[in-house]
Image (cartoon, helix red, strand yellow):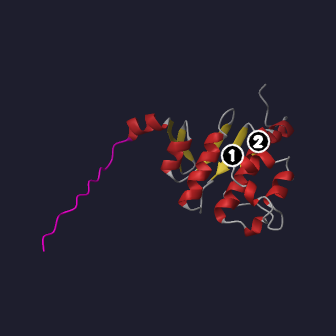
Amino acid sequence: RIENIRTDQEVIRKNMGVCMQHNVLFDYLTTKEHLLLYVDGVETLKETGLYSHRHKLAGTLSGGMKRKLSIAIALLGGSRVVILDEPTTGVDPCSRRSIWEIISKNKKGRTIILSTHHLDEAEVLSDRIAFLEHGGLKCCGSPFYLKETFGDGYHLTLTKKKVCV
């Protein structure tokens, strides 16, 4: 069944998850309490690596843990459409890779719309990539197609010159 955005908003909202670019969390709730606001999120805590932090207040979590919690909230309830706005902004490289794993594990049976400035992230996580410029679509396709079609550019080769003293 195809839902109409004008008449079926309640159904659409139940099937949609959103992770904003900035964390929208309550500092005085624990990670577990955040997920319980939506559904019983204990399994989601385990899937995202937050289970050992379930009793910590959100305000005391690291930036990477806060992002994971925001993503976990977006994935709760089996949302069929998930919008992730810059999911790895401001996190360290280890957390970034961990977030990539969470997203990859939760792709099946969903449409994930992800915005990012990181081309490596888009390539790893996406089946299709769209480039926007000044509010308009510049190009769209699989990572392989885009590389083959637009892969021209500069190639930089660095060599180290041996210095004899």
The foreground one among 159 and 22 is 159
Q: Where's residue 90, x and y in %?
A: 59, 63
Of helix, strand and loop, which one carries label 2? strand
Dominant secondary structure, magenta: loop
Labels 1 and 2 touching (C-beta < 8 A): yes
What type is the residue that disc 1 sits on? Ile
Magenta segment: does it hold 77?
no
Seen from this angle, which residue lies furthest top? 1
Residue 154 is inside the magenta segment: yes
Q: Residue at x 85, y 49 (%)?
A: 38
Q: How far separated are the C-alphas under marks 1 and 2?
A: 8 Å
Q: Which residues are magenta?
A: 151-165
Tell me where residue 77 sits by quadrant.
Answer: top right
**Is 86 displayed left or right of 2 in the figure?**
left
Residue designated by label 1: 83
Q: Nearer the viewer, residue 110 or 10?
A: 110
The percent position of residue 94, horizontal first and vertical second, equals 56, 58
Q: Earlier in the sequence, mark 1 or mark 2?
A: 2
Query: Which quadrant of the figure contains the C terminus?
Result: bottom left
In percent of width and height, residue 43 lies at 78, 45
Quick check: 94 above or below 100?
Answer: below
Tag 1's secondary structure? Answer: strand
Q: Which mark is residue 16?
A: 2
Residue at the spot x=56%, y=62% of the render? 92
Residue 131 visible here: no
**Image quadrant in which the N terminus is located:** top right
Residue at the (55%, 36%) spot, across then down: 127
Q: At which x and y percent is residue 5?
A: 79, 37
Determine whether, in the image, residue 29 is placed left or right of residue 45.
right
Under mark 2, the amino acid is Met
Asked if residue 142 lies left or right of residue 47, the reply is left
